Image (cartoon, rainbow, N blue to C red):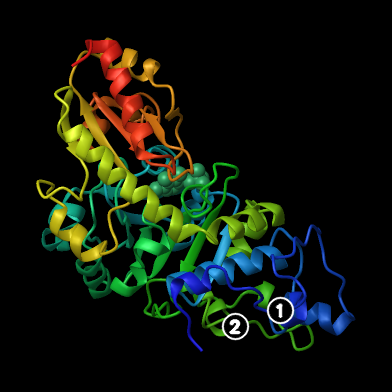
Amino acid sequence: MSYHFDTLKVRAAYDPALHNQAVSPPIYQTTAYEFRDTKNADGLFALTEPGFLYTRVNNPTVDILERRVAELDGGSAALALASGMAAISYTLLTLAEGGGRILASPYLYGGSSDAFQRIFPNFGIHFDQSKALIDNPSELEKEIKPDTKAIFVESIGNPTGAIADLEALAALAHRHGIPLVVDNTFATPYLLNPIQYGADIVIYSATKALNGHGNLIAGLIVETGKFPWDNGNFPQLQKEEYVLRDRSTGKKRSFLEAVPQAPFVSRIRLTYLNYFGAALGPFDAYLTLIGIETLSERVQKQLENAKKVVAYLEKNKHVAWIQYSGLESSRYYQRGKKYFSKGIPGIFSFGFKGTIEESEAFLNAIQLWSYHVNVGDARSLIVNSPKTTHSELTQEEQEYAAIESNLIRLSLGLEDPEDLIADLEQAFAKVFGAS
Ligand SMILES: *Cc1c(COP(=O)(O)O)cnc(C)c1O
């Protein structure tokens, strides 16, 4: 029996042997798991028997979250981690292990841009960040070099709202035998399933709308189980591994052989997660599962609220521009209609018309919106991105990423839209006088 999204997100048990009595997911607050006998221990370590080893590697509560998100996204398997940054880092370290290049969008989360430019090169992993990735995928062929290992984009970029043409990028990546990796944090699996359009790996910061309550940090990696990892570009997934040896015969296997439906996330689980250790705790996995139960309702309300605030700002003379892909004037409007048929995520930015002092006075006059750097929260958030979320970027990098100095980002929450608009109105009035 296959279910619709709204049914899947609140479904009760997955594994009757583990939790058939519990309606709400049980929290397995345990470090390790008793082995039945030595044969069971051998089988668990070699991945020939299902079960749990140690909470740094897997945990039954975290497992429920992994299965649920894989299912919501149409993937074959998922891996949950302690943060979205860990999900991005472990993914790219795996793909470009030993050195290589990643072709990436310039319109990215500030932490991603920063890590790509300043940390990954120390490991021999270099990034080609090209605007053509978003604006003109047909020009990209020449940007793919012999050691390019993946294409990395956000389905809808941060904070500019740039929408990627996933179908075109997937076709390009596949012509070159490399995967398309999509950070789908802003969209969530409710608004967009990148796998439907050809993505091979989908990443989430579950810290944001997926959990949606501003109370934890978590990340996820979803894979399709369909990418041809044996095409010669990724020997790391074909390598026979000591960790996967059969304890009695000593015969070793590769991840591709041992877990053909989940070779990519399994390799990360037993290498990067196991040894570098950004494991998600069971309680945070539980909270994320509870958050997911209301995912569609929250995201839908947020996007409706965004439409109303956009309509208000469009008429405001202190607003220089609005970057919201739901506006017909947006260069991403057509792509938005194609990829976001349920609506554009409720996160957008506008240009404040005034001096830096006036824009700071405006932010300081805000009372209801919360001034901080999260997005997708139950509460509405306002932030001056160039000075906060993207402040580590140099001025040049900010300009390249289309982050103007007067940019203010809004992330809509679940409040009454009239109250949100009234708060903006009183803050403008405090700076410029009543209009
Ligand atoms: C927040 C965010 C991240 C990083 O996630 P954390 O959970 O904060 O580590 C990555 N990508 C996007 C698009 C984000 O918004």
245 relative position to 261: left or right: right
Q: Residues within 10 Å of mark 2 (few under 14, many from 20)?
A: some
Residue 62 sits in quarter: bottom right
User: As drawn, which residue projects farthest toward the right?
Assistant: 37
* Quadrant in the picture for the C terminus: top left
Label 2: element kind = helix
Vertical relation: 351 (above or below) 211: above
Q: Answer yes or no: do the residues labelled 2 and 1 have beta carbons within 8 Å?
A: yes
Residue 382 sits in quarter: top left
Q: Position of residue 262 (x, y in %)?
A: 53, 76
Query: Which residue in the protein does label 2 denote?
Result: 258
141 relative position to 13: left or right: left
Query: Which residue in the protein does label 1 denote?
Result: 46
Q: Residue at x 57, y 46 (%)?
A: 217
Q: Residue at x 79, y 87 (%)?
A: 248
Q: Residue at x 56, y 55 (%)?
A: 291
Q: Nearer the viewer, residue 93 or 428?
A: 428
